[in-house]
Image: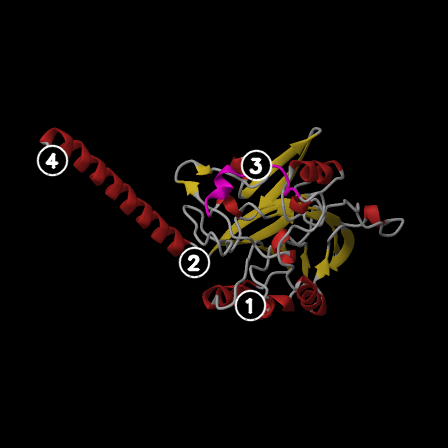
């Protein structure tokens, strides 16, 4: 081969080889990081003055698969934090045979009071797709129009029955109150906005004097679409919990998430921020989640997390 032609070919081969090596290293790192489970600690002053702190453990996007023993053991270990309340914002399942492993993993935590809303991967199994397809996914809801997507239905009824047997409260388009010492926790939640299953149910009515009793309003949704956050904010929520985003799942160090898988701004894809609408601000807690789809089993610069959030009293 002529030397003038051979040199560019060698450079191309070296470039391709380097790119392949870098891609392989990134994939290996992503497979490792998806199992580096962490607990993020937050505190937010939203309780009536003089209230004792309320410790909440926020779980989201577990995406449980059979055989994920490390994830199960870590979830079971979270009971050591002895939360006053467990908040679960959905996408618990990743396989039709995952209900028993999930209930086993959550068993110690179901000894504590809990509330939950489902996500699409509570109802339906994930589908095979390009594992990086979420990087170009639209921010609109899943195109189901409120109908079942064309994929296998999971055994969500048995999952809900297991949660209910433990006393966890289903907030799918529902509201309910829960007394906690001298404080009343008023909850509202919606079914999955990503599937357009959501319908806001308002707040518990309580007694005629209920508004004067010490209380806090807590709202739950799986997917934090702006229309839902605006609705909660306008209705007087004191704090909002959500998941769905996986924190971006593949993030750029020093920059953050590239996508949120909904219309939430990417800089809000995980963590505690303030949501503003119509002149009102509400703390918004978005979990980066615990699992991944089995068809995209990696995380980069976005470790799986549970969130231990302490609700504290406001100043007078």
Label 2 Cα crowd, 10 Å radius (few <14 / some 14-19 / many 20+): many
Provide the secondary structure element on which disc 1 rests.
Answer: helix
The label shown at residue 6 is none
Q: Residue at 68%, 58% (x, y): give it.
A: 115
According to the picture, the residue beneath numbered tag 1 turns out to be: 105
Please report whichever mark, 3 or 2, sits nearer to the chain's N-terminal start: 2
* Residue 138: assigned label: 3
Measured as percent of width and height from the top left, residue 88 is found at 63, 56
Q: Quadrant of the N terminus?
A: top left
Q: Is residue 136 magenta?
A: yes
Q: Nearer the viewer, residue 300 or 179?
A: 300
Gap in angstroms between the C-alphas marked 2 and 1? 15 Å
Most prominent secondary structure in the magenta stretch? loop
Which label lies toward us, 1 or 4?
4
x, y (%) of residue 121? 60, 55
Mark 3 or mark 1: whose residue is earlier in sequence: 1
- Examine the structure image and report whether residue 115 is included in the region drawn in magenta: no
Q: Which mark is residue 1?
A: 4
Q: Is residue 31 above or below residue 270?
A: below
Question: Label 3 crowding class (10 Å Cα cut-off): few <14, some 14-19, many 20+?
Answer: some
Q: Which mark is first along the chain, 4 or 1?
A: 4
């Amino acid at each position: 081969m002529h030397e003038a032609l051979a040199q560019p070919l060698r450079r191309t081969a070296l470039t391709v080889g380097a790119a392949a090596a870098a891609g392989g290293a990134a994939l290996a790192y992503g497979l490792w990081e998806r199992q580096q489970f962490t607990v993020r600690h937050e505190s937010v002053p939203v309780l009536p003055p003089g209230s004792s702190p309320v410790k909440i453990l926020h779980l989201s996007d577990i995406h449980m698969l059979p055989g994920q023993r490390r994830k199960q053991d870590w979830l079971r270990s979270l009971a050591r934090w002895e939360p006053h309340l467990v908040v679960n914002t959905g996408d618990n399942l990743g396989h039709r045979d995952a209900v028993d492993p999930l209930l086993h993993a959550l068993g110690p935590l179901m000894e504590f009071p809990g509330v939950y809303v489902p996500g699409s991967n509570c109802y339906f199994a994930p589908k095979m797709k390009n594992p990086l397809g979420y990087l170009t996914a639209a921010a609109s809801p899943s195109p189901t129009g409120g109908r079942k997507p064309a994929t296998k239905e999971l055994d969500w009824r048995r999952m809900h029955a297991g949660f209910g047997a433990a006393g966890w409260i289903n907030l799918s388009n529902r509201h309910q109150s829960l007394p906690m010492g001298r404080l009343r926790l008023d909850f509202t939640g919606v079914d999955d906005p990503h599937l357009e299953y959501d319908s806001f149910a308002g707040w518990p009515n309580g007694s005629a004097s209920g508004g004067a009793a010490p209380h806090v309003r807590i709202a739950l949704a799986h997917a934090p679409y702006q229309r839902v956050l605006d609705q909660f904010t306008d209705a007087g929520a004191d704090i909002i919990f959500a998941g769905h985003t996986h924190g971006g799942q593949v993030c750029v160090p020093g920059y953050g998430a590239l996508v949120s898988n909904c219309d939430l701004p990417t800089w809000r894809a995980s963590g505690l921020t303030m949501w503003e609408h119509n002149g009102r601000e509400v703390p918004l807690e978005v979990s980066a989640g615990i699992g991944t789809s089995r068809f995209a089993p990696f995380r980069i610069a976005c470790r799986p997390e549970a969130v231990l959030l302490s609700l504290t009293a406001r100043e007078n």
